[in-house]
Image: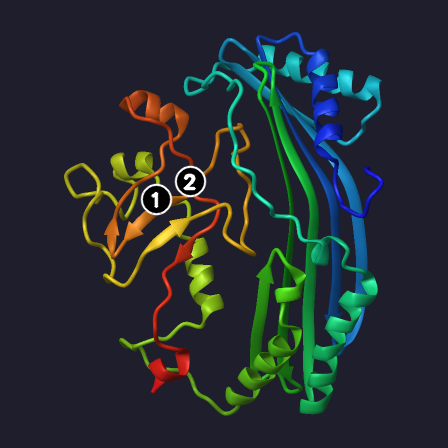
């Protein structure tokens, strides 16, 4: 690991490791994916901190290709003998594998946008700082006479991709999520709140605790709703979780094969049709502040800003390299984040 507090392998260390793995390769094509960094966590339950831990690891995945026979192996042992062994094992498996009819040749050199996704506030987060954040929830629970259970999850590190066709890409990033559930002592009512981002300084621990307590208390004595249609206002986190499940459906192949809600009855897709309210615009952007993502896919294809829905109209779909080749169009990777246009009204106003 590099000498500074930045977690994960540096660009130079990642390139050196990839080059070493590739030097052992004898396959027609070889790809290397390297993930490195730390995973930190703090868990609370029954109004106390129960566990806290950290892992620091480097994972090397090798993909070997003979013709269209493909296999992959993974190791976290970085000595020369182990790296050579994982390449030999991968190549042996590839020779035994059936041909993949959808395999596309490994990419050569690419140009990637520079994404500043690493936040020192997250990468340098200490066990004590996580404990202080967790204590806010525990104090709120004790004061409200409810039971708190929560989880603070932190990742900081880097990932790299390299191929035998001279491709190399490197990303460095951080991410943190804090979630909390408050429950009454009799278990009859509960409230959940959470926050996530790349920058720890944006995690509102006091707000999370207050929201979870409020929801728990507001639900006391409530009964279930009868079946029917209701106007529902989702808080930002709930809307975000729904959007997370939308990210992989803007896929051309699924739509064109009739396996998507974006498929037309009788064939074709809903492209350029108005599917949402005109106030809805959805984009993906790897450079979005505090929601940065990688600038390339696992295979090394560049990822950039994309508009998926504009004023309610479906504007584009993603194309894998294989499907794009079959359809005679340019490949387009899926979005790694989804950003929906802001409305002018706040939640309290909409409720009123």
Residue behind mark 1 = 250
The quarter in which the C terminus is drawn is: bottom left
Foreground of the two, 230 or 226: 230
Residue 189 visible in this rendered orientation of the protein:
no
Residue 285, above or below 113: below
Pick whichever of labels 2 and 1 is earlier in the sequence.
1
Residue 334 is tagged as 2
Q: Give the colour scheme of this rendering.
A: rainbow
Q: Give x and y (percent) for residue 1.
A: 82, 37
Q: Give x and y (percent) for residue 314.
A: 26, 48
Q: Is residue 336 left or right of residue 351?
A: right
Residue 171, above or below 194: above
Q: Is residue 107 left or right of residue 207?
A: left
Q: Is residue 26 left or right of residue 222?
A: right
Q: Give x and y (percent) for residue 338.
A: 43, 52
Secondary structure beneath dot 1 equals loop
């Amino acid at each position: 690991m590099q000498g500074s507090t930045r977690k994960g392998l540096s660009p130079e260390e990642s390139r050196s490791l990839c080059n070493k793995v590739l030097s052992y390769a004898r396959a027609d094509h070889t790809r290397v994916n390297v993930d490195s960094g730390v995973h930190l966590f703090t868990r609370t339950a029954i109004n106390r901190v129960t566990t806290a831990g950290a892992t620091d690891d480097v994972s090397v995945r090798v993909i070997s290709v003979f013709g269209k026979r493909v296999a992959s192996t993974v190791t976290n042992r970085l000595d020369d003998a182990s790296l050579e062994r994982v390449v030999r094992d991968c190549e042996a498996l590839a020779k035994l594998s059936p041909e993949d009819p959808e395999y596309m040749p490994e990419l050569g050199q690419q140009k990637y946008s520079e994404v500043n996704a690493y936040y020192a506030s997250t990468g340098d987060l200490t066990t004590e700082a996580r404990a202080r954040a967790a204590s806010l929830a525990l104090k709120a629970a004790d004061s409200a006479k409810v039971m708190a259970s929560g989880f603070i999850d932190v990742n900081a590190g880097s990932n790299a991709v390299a191929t035998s066709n001279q491709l190399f890409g490197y990303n460095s990033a951080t991410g943190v999520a804090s979630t909390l559930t408050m429950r009454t002592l009799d278990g009859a009512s509960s409230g959940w709140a959470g926050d996530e981002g790349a920058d720890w300084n944006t995690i509102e621990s006091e707000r999370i605790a207050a929201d979870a307590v409020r929801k728990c208390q507001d639900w006391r004595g409530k009964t279930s709703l009868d079946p029917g249609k209701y106007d529902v206002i989702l808080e930002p986190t709930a809307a975000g979780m729904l959007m997370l499940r939308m990210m992989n459906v803007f896929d051309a192949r699924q739509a064109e094969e009739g396996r998507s809600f974006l498929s037309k009855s009788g064939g074709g897709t809903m492209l350029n049709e108005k599917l949402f309210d005109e106030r809805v615009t959805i984009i993906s952007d790897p450079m979005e502040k505090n929601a940065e993502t990688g600038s390339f896919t696992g295979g090394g294809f560049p990822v950039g800003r994309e508009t998926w829905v504009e004023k309610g109209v479906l504007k584009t779909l993603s194309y894998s390299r294989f499907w794009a080749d079959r359809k005679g169009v340019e490949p387009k990777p899926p979005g790694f984040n989804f950003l929906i246009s802001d409305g002018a009204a706040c939640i309290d106003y909409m409720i009123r």
